[in-house]
């Protein structure tokens, strides 16, 4: 019950009861309600800025947990990338080198994904950039693992064929040291004996008397034994498999025929001076995957270290070739 208030009336010299007008009462009530609503709004607004609701706390905890898991995932990907890089290095520099397989370039191992945007569905979120980068790393890791797996499958297959591979690689000097007059010219820029112009000499020239035996440098199949190639005269080509082919040019005569299987050390012909040749000698070339390579690196099966060093010294001289 509200208190009754009085005021002193000097005219009547008595206290009179204060009568509150209804309009004023309604005004006071309206002001009170408005102030209460404003206070409530301010309280809710301030609370929403500084006081977290249970739902917000739960969502914030889930977000922090997701960020932690993403950080741990990135650390694991860092470790995986380190392990993969180590395997790739050993694969290129040891395994593939040992088996004479071409190394896999980094561009192929780490290539991205072209075409449409694979990560469009991940855009538009607060952490989209972080999430997209993580997905990209995972996709690239998966691709690197696939590339490495295929490479190791190839190495495993080569390992199974190791004995055949080692027998097939052209690994001996095609003319015995005791039969040589000298090693006339090596692989590289040399003076042409006919034009006197420096040009690329794609093989090695071994001078020896006419009729000196020439030996197959590795196991294989005779691909050609004819004089149908310009400049080579009578020549023999042996396909050793694994991308290797050896060529023996300017022969006096053959000792093999096309499609004949030969073993390393078999006599396949005799030194001559047929074709574009200035004097009796053997012009010897090696191809790997249709590319000419320096034969100097393939004599580990027949020369001592001292003999190889002498051969290397003579082969490096920029003298005149004999063809």
Image (cartoon, helix red, strand yellow):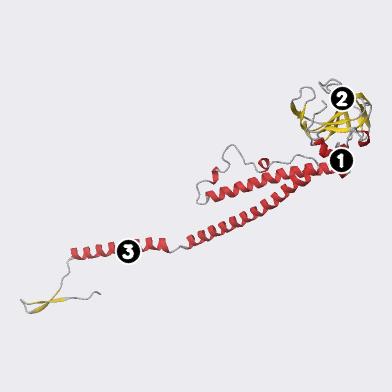
Count the marks. Answer: 3
- Of callouts 2 and 3, the N-terminal one: 3
Which residue is nearer to you in this view: 284 or 51? 284
Which residue is nearer to you in this view: 52 or 317? 317
User: Which picture quadrant has residue 52?
Assistant: bottom left
Name the front one of labels 2 and 3.
2
Mark 2, residue position: 279
User: Which picture quadrant has residue 16?
Assistant: bottom left
Which mark is drawn over residue 39?
A: 3
Q: Position of residue 284 (x, y in %)?
A: 84, 30
Q: CA distance from mark 2 to mark 3?
A: 112 Å
Q: Residue at x 85, y 40 (%)?
A: 310
Q: Residues within 10 Å of mark 3 (few under 14, many from 20)?
A: few
- Of callouts 1 and 2, the N-terminal one: 1
Q: Residue at x 87, y 22 (%)?
A: 274
* Direction from residue 153 to residue 111 in the image, left or right: left
Q: Residues within 10 Å of mark 1 (few under 14, many from 20)?
A: few
| Element at label 1 | helix
Q: CA distance from mark 3 to mark 1?
A: 91 Å
Mark 1, residue position: 166
């Amino acid at each position: 019950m509200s208190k009754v208030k009085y005021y002193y009336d000097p005219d009547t010299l008595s206290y009179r009861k204060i009568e509150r007008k209804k309009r004023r009462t309604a005004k006071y009530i309206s002001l009170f309600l408005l102030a209460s609503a404003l206070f409530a709004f301010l309280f809710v607004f301030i609370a929403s800025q500084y006081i977290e609701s249970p739902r917000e706390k739960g969502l914030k905890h889930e977000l922090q947990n997701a960020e932690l898991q993403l950080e741990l995932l990135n650390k694991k990907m860092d470790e995986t990338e380190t392990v993969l890089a180590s395997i790739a290095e050993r694969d290129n520099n040891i395994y593939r080198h040992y088996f004479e397989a071409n190394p896999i370039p980094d561009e192929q191992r780490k290539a991205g994904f072209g075409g449409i945007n694979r990560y469009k569905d991940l855009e538009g979120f607060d952490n989209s950039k972080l999430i997209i980068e993580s997905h990209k790393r995972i996709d690239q890791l998966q691709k690197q693992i696939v590339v490495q797996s295929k490479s190791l499958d190839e190495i495993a297959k080569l390992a199974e064929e190791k004995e055949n591979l080692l027998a097939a690689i052209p690994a001996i000097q095609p003319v015995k040291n005791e039969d040589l007059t000298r090693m006339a010219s090596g692989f590289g820029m040399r003076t042409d004996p006919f034009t006197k112009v420096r040009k690329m000499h794609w093989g090695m020239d071994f001078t020896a008397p006419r009729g000196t035996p020439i030996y197959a440098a590795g196991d294989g199949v005779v691909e050609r034994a004819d004089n149908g190639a310009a400049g080579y005269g009578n020549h023999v080509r042996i396909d050793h498999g694994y991308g290797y082919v050896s060529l023996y040019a300017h022969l006096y005569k053959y000792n093999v025929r096309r499609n004949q299987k030969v073993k390393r050390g078999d006599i396949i012909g005799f030194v001559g001076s047929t074709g574009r040749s200035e004097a009796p000698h053997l012009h010897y070339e090696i191809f790997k995957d249709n590319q000419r390579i320096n034969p100097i690196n393939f004599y580990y099966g027949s020369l001592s270290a001292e003999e190889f060093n002498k051969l290397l010294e003579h082969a490096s001289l920029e003298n005149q070739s004999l063809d």
